[in-house]
Image (spheres, helix red, strand yellow):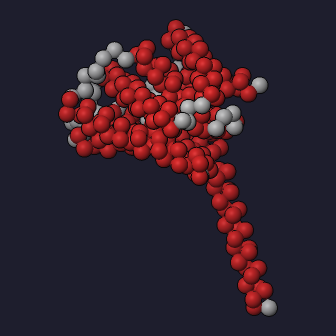
Amino acid sequence: MHHLLFAACVATATFTQSLTGFAFGLVLLGLVAVFHLAPLPVAANVVTVMVLANAALLVRGVPDLPRRLLAPSYGSSLVGVAIGACLLAWLSDNAIGVVRFALGLAILACSLLLVVQTKPRAQLASPGTFAFYGCVSGVMGGVFASAGPPMVFHLYRQPLDRVVVRDTLVLLFAVNAVLRLVIVLAQGRFDAASLALSAEALPVVLTVTWLARRYPPNWSPTAVRRVVFVLLAIAGASLVAPAVTGATAQAHAKVSAVSHQLRIFTA
């Protein structure tokens, strides 16, 4: 049953990716976490492999982005990936609840990006701005294997052709995924479960991607954004709410304990 549910989660994430161009990783991680299908580090490893498989089909060369922007974007993202991967390793051993909470916040932020209306800039942003968004995306890529939202938000505000934006994102995700996979392998954190789930996910990703391209749904862009927004919001809230209620319960218990001690002391 868990394997069928995992396949359904992969199919949902892939279909979302085909509609929006991003969010595969966050959707899959969110659904896996909500249904407790696999540890988050294992699910992140699966996302890494799927990103590489997708890039192998789509990458055709270096994107036509000005060279003065390529270096800061890609260089800073690689630094961010290294930081994020090491951060995930530490959090997985010491504070997995923090990882789930941070993932929920990232998914909620991603959902808001779909409904926030932004106007394209008249001029390209500075290299420093590209470096900042590249680093933030890299950290997300290192922790969650999903570097999309920050750089997607930034690039789609630039006066660039949509093909250039797509190619830049696909190659950026691929470069990040390669480094993340190397780091995870070096840490010994790509286990048999990661390999098995990747093997299960690959045919689902390829099939759903082909079907989505062959028979694209006749949905308006607004309808697509709303559907994906609801999906991401539910997944994100499902991860954030338990952490918030748990922290509230712990705080209430501590207050009650302190009040009890005060009553004993003053009695």
Q: Residue at x 60, y 19 (%)?
A: 199
> Is residue 91 left or right of 171 when viewed as pictured?
right
Q: Residue furthest top?
A: 214
Give percent across and percent down for residue 143.
Answer: 49, 41
Q: Looking at the rendering, which quadrant does residue 228 occupy?
A: top right
Query: Visible in this render: residue 188?
Result: yes
Instruction: Give the mark count.
Output: 0
> Is residue 175 left or right of 235 when viewed as pictured?
left
Give percent across and percent down for residue 177.
Answer: 44, 29
Q: Residue at x 35, y 32 (%)?
A: 156
> Is residue 205 left or right of 149 when viewed as pictured?
right
Q: Looking at the rendering, which quadrant does residue 140 occupy?
A: top left
Give percent across and percent down for residue 106.
Answer: 51, 43
> Is residue 78 left or right of 127 when viewed as pictured?
right
**Closer-to-camera residue (1/188):** 188
Quadrant of the frame with the N terminus: top right
Give percent across and percent down for residue 247.
Answer: 65, 60
Relative vertical location of residue 30 with respect to residue 49 in this rendering, above or below: below
Query: Visible in this render: residue 221?
Result: no
Q: Residue at x 28, y 21 (%)?
A: 62
